[in-house]
Image (cartoon, grey):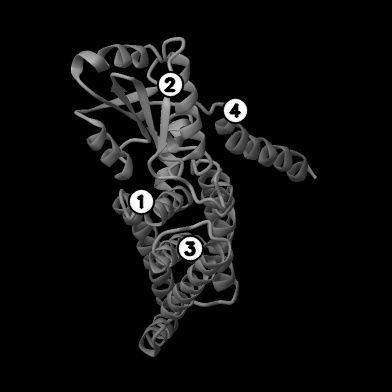
Amino acid sequence: MAAVVVLVPLLVALALWAFAWPAARTAPRDLPLGVAGSVSATAPVEKQLARQDGAFEVHRYADEAAAREAVEDRNVYGAIVVTGQGPKLLTASAASPLVAQLLQQAVAGQAPQGTTVTTTDVVPAPAEDPRGAALTSSVLPMALAGVAAGVVATLLGLRGVRAVGALTGAAVLVGVVSAAIAHSWLGVLSGDWWAEAGALSLSTLAVSGAVAGLAALAGPPGIGLGGFLIILLGNPFSGASSAPEMLPEPVGTIGQWLPPGAGASLLRSVSFFDGAAAIGPALTLAWWATLGLGAVLLGDALKRRRTTTTPETVTAREAALVN
């Protein structure tokens, strides 16, 4: 009774902290933003941005073409181009609809009265998902799919190479089915179909491998630890609904180290930006998958070593007892 009375409120408090706290503190923190134009023309804009108390990390570009390329390469979320006719804003709603809207409001609020700010969406979100709701909503189901695969493989008693094969096969099928639904049916993804399927498969394998690996080394508590890392931390810390730079520090950074955050970033890159900035999250997911599957193999080897006793060892022990 004491455990129930204490643990349930503790878990509720932990879940509220993990999910509600980042959402309640959403605001730009060193958000990469470009400023393009001559030094004399951009100086007032940079001065105004500097007054935002560290909200923006300003990147300077010589002209609009360079700023546009930076947005397409995911180096910045947007750029302010200073022209003789007034400021021009470049955004990428595919990177984050929330950030694109925030930049429009910020630039419009700082523009001189009577000045019209022209906005160009360089990399727009799909017409079927203009607010990015479908991609955001896919983070938790993908995390749950990976956790479920790891738990099922563990409960079925799969070990070693058989467990690795089962987890890999399940991840591949999850990626193919998810790409078929999100890309072919719903049309909320618009990149290369196989690259999207690969990103979804790798994300699933990173989660399932981590859960099964922790279970292989630590037993049932490993499943709880895996669920805590992926569901209670990885999902709300992913920044998929906004951006990692919109979350309180160091939540955004931690979220990109965990599979849900890295998976969402990788999926955006391969689906909307032709693979730009995909190497970092892909390596993060690959490390999780490699370490998780390696832990599965290591756990099986350790268990075999503990349970295997050679006849020579038994005879030696019996002889020692007799003497």
Q: Amino acid at mark 4?
A: Ala
Measure the C-alpha gap from mark 3 to mark 1.
Answer: 21 Å
**Residue assigned mark 4:** 24
The label shown at residue 107 is 2
Per the image, label 1 sits on a secondary structure element best described as loop
**Image depth: mark 4 or mark 1 in front:** 1
**Image depth: mark 2 or mark 4 in front:** 2
Measure the C-alpha gap from mark 2 to mark 1.
Answer: 24 Å
Sequence order check: which comes first, mark 2 or mark 4?
4
Measure the C-alpha gap from mark 3 to mark 4.
Answer: 29 Å
The label shown at residue 204 is 3
Q: Are marks 3 and 1 in contact (CB under 8 Å)?
A: no
**Residue placed most toward the observer, 33 or 107:** 107
Near mark 4 (Cα within 10 A), the count class, few <14, some 14-19 or many ≥20, is few
**Image depth: mark 3 or mark 1 in front:** 1
Residue at the spot 39% in from the left edge and 53% down from the top edge: 266
Q: Amino acid at mark 1?
A: Phe
